[in-house]
């Protein structure tokens, strides 16, 4: 056999193995959206600690959540937040699990509105707003970890 016939035969063999796989590959499903409700309390002096619970509403079902976190930086006081919002880029309930990092600062005195957008390593985005009460002043690096119960 000539080298061009051998090359043609190898190319044909390789293509016959690849093409069926391409035809059977499914298109990835578009990521969905859901809703979230969180009740989070925090307190701290230099190191802040937060904890709470909530619920994910996704694909016609409710999934209970645990939330907690630690922040390091300048933190003093205690506050509570009742948050609700939209969960974007979620394919399955487990995608909401993970740590949502945040670098920032805030001052909360008394009661008032709050809004935030967070994302986790799974690509899930939380867009939440709600009501905060208490006194807390912070400039820190922190994270909120969410897990299914």
Image (cartoon, grey):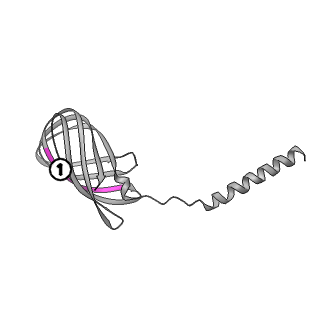
Residue at image x 73%, y 54%? 15
User: Horizontally, is 39 left or right of 27 in the view?
Assistant: left
Residue 94 lies, in percent from the top left, at 37, 55
Q: Position of residue 10 (x, y in %)?
A: 79, 49
Q: Judge from the rendering whether residue 35 lies leftward or rightward of residue 52; answer left or right.
A: right
From the image, give the main secondary structure of the stretch colored magenta: strand
Query: What's the residue at 70%, 55% (across, down)?
Result: 17
Query: What residue lies at 28% left-to-right and 57% top-to-bottom?
Result: 36
- Identify the image quadrant of residue 101: top left
Q: Around disc 1, counting alpha carbons within 10 Å, would you say few (fewer than 14), some (14 to 19), or many (20 or more)? A: many
Q: What element carries label 1?
A: strand
Residue 80 is covered by the magenta coloring? yes
Q: Quadrant of the C terminus?
A: bottom left
Q: Residue furthest bottom?
A: 60
Extent of the magenta region = 79-88
- Where is residue 102? Give x, y as percent: 29, 40
Q: Position of residue 126 (x, y in %)?
A: 32, 51
Does the magenta portion include 121? no
Out of 83 and 43, give the one closest to the viewer: 43
- Residue marked by disc 1: 81
């Amino acid at each position: 056999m000539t080298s061009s016939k051998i090359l043609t035969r190898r190319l044909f063999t390789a293509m016959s193995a690849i093409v069926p796989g391409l035809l059977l590959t499914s298109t990835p499903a578009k990521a969905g959206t859901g809703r979230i409700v969180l009740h989070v309390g925090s307190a701290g002096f230099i190191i802040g600690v937060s904890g709470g619970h909530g619920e994910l509403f996704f694909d016609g079902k409710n999934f209970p959540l645990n939330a907690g976190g630690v922040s390091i930086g300048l933190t003093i006081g205690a506050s509570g937040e009742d948050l609700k919002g939209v969960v974007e880029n979620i394919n399955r309930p487990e995608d909401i699990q993970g740590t949502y990092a945040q670098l920032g600062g805030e001052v909360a005195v008394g009661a008032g509105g709050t809004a935030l957008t967070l994302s986790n390593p799974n690509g899930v985005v939380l867009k939440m707003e709600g009501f905060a009460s208490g006194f807390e002043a912070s400039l820190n690096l922190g994270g909120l970890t969410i897990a299914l119960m």
